[in-house]
């Protein structure tokens, strides 16, 4: 990510639809919102500056109030330096009486969905008026039905509305699924499949990409890999759309999203410090980023140990951990916890052996 990029984030959506019988409340939406907020608000992406983050999730605002709040946010003096704007929505999508696409709110009513929901047309007008010089990224994890399997309707209106309604500086959309395939809620984990995968992509990264920051299309690919890993045989592929790009496709050209896999591997104050490297692996395990931790453990053994037996053990553990991670969606919660504990204990035991023996040779820094 270029140092001259300034990113603003708007979080939208709802989990509680008390005034609607059509749109069911779901903790999955709230859990998804919590995950994505943690993934976006950190030292690698957007630091927790109040003027950079606008959080409207589950707020009891009507559409006019939301429009006014967004207007004030975009017009703040301290936000005039923004170059990029991310708008994330999770909840139910729908259509009004004129078949215009809407994002439902906690106050959405079945008898007048259009007035009580946030119309996409109105949101686009606000963006045109107050963010016309920004690159805009929509991340839409939205639904149309009220069941666990829901359909994203955004694709039906892309050609009709987005062609004329959004800034020429660039607009891209990352959608939870294609028009043909449904988006899913993972009932066992009370989370939307898409946001679970996206948050993992943002917090883990992918070491197959060597850049420190990824484009929207690359983060889509990493997200889909995470979705497949967590939900074998059930994964739904997200889609990226860039409806209007007179200056080039920002989904391909702008490296906005941190690749934590490369960033964190470069973040050691002293890469030859045994304790610092070991503590980082323990932190990865503590934060439940197991596959990353084992990859780093493998690198750790290669650099700090002369024991072929230890190296063999870690190579085997690395292969088993990836197999375990791919089967995660097949295990019930208790089975997952038991198997996870076994692998975590093995990783910590190997780490302890290396740090206790400290059999490395003296390393010369060039």
Image (cartoon, rainbow, N blue to C red):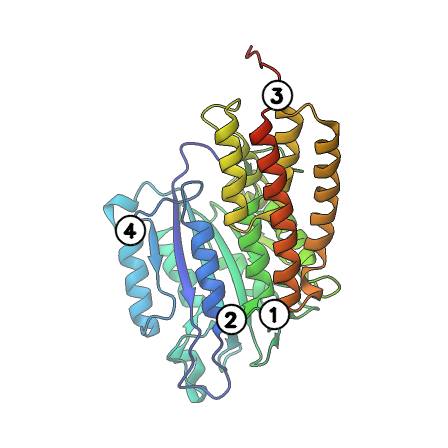
Reply above or below: 135 against 229: above
SS for dot 1: strand
Reply above or below: 3 against 260: above
Q: Nearer the viewer, mark 4 or mark 2?
A: 2
Q: Nearer the viewer, mark 3 or mark 4?
A: 3
Q: Along the polypeptide, which appears first: circle 4 or circle 2?
A: 2
Q: Residue at x 57, y 49 (%)?
A: 201
SS for dot 4: loop
Q: Are marks 4 and 2 in contact (CB under 8 Å)?
A: no
| Cα–Cα span, label 1 and label 4 | 32 Å
Q: Nearer the viewer, mark 2 or mark 3?
A: 3
342 horizontally vs 42: left or right: right
128 horizontally vs 189: left or right: left
Q: Along the polypeptide, which appears first: circle 1 or circle 4?
A: 4
Q: Along the polypeptide, which appears first: circle 1 or circle 3?
A: 1
Q: Nearer the viewer, mark 1 or mark 3?
A: 3
- Please state the horizontal and vertical placement of residue 92, each as a whole percent of the image: 51, 74
Q: Which residue is mark 2?
A: 28
């Amino acid at each position: 990510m270029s140092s001259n990029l300034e990113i603003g984030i708007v979080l939208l959506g709802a989990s509680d639809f008390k005034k609607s019988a059509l749109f069911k409340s779901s903790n999955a939406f709230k859990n998804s919102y919590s995950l994505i907020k943690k993934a976006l608000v950190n030292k690698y992406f957007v630091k927790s500056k109040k003027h950079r983050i606008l959080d409207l999730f589950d707020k009891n605002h009507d559409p006019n109030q939301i429009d006014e709040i967004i207007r004030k946010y975009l017009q703040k003096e301290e936000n005039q330096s923004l170059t990029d704007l991310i708008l994330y929505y999770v909840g139910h999508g729908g259509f009004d009486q004129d078949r215009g696409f809407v994002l439902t709110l906690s106050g959405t009513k079945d008898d007048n969905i259009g007035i009580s929901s946030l119309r996409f047309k109105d949101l686009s007008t606000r963006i045109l008026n107050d963010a016309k010089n920004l690159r805009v990224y929509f991340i839409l994890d939205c639904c149309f039905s009220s069941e666990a399997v829901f359909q994203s309707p955004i694709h039906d209106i892309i050609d009709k509305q987005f062609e004329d309604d959004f800034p020429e500086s660039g607009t891209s959309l990352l959608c939870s699924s294609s028009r043909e395939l449904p988006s899913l809620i993972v009932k066992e984990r009370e989370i939307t499949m898409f946001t679970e995968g996206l948050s993992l992509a943002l917090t883990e990264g992918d070491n197959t990409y060597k850049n420190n920051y990824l484009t929207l299309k690359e983060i889509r690919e990493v997200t889909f890999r995470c979705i497949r890993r967590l939900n074998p045989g059930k994964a739904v592929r997200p889609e990226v759309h860039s409806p209007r790009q007179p200056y080039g496709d920002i989904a391909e050209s702008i490296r906005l999203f941190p690749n934590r896999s490369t960033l964190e591997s470069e973040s050691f104050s002293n890469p030859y410090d045994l304790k610092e490297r070991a503590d980082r692996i323990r932190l990865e395990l503590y934060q439940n980023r197991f596959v990353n931790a084992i990859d780093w453990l493998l690198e750790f053994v290669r650099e700090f140990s002369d024991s072929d037996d230890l190296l063999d053990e870690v190579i085997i553990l690395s292969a088993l951990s990836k197999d375990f991670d791919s089967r995660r969606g097949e295990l019930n919660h208790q089975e997952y916890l038991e198997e996870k504990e076994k692998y975590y204990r093995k990783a910590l035991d190997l780490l302890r052996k290396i740090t206790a023996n400290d059999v490395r040779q003296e390393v010369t820094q060039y």
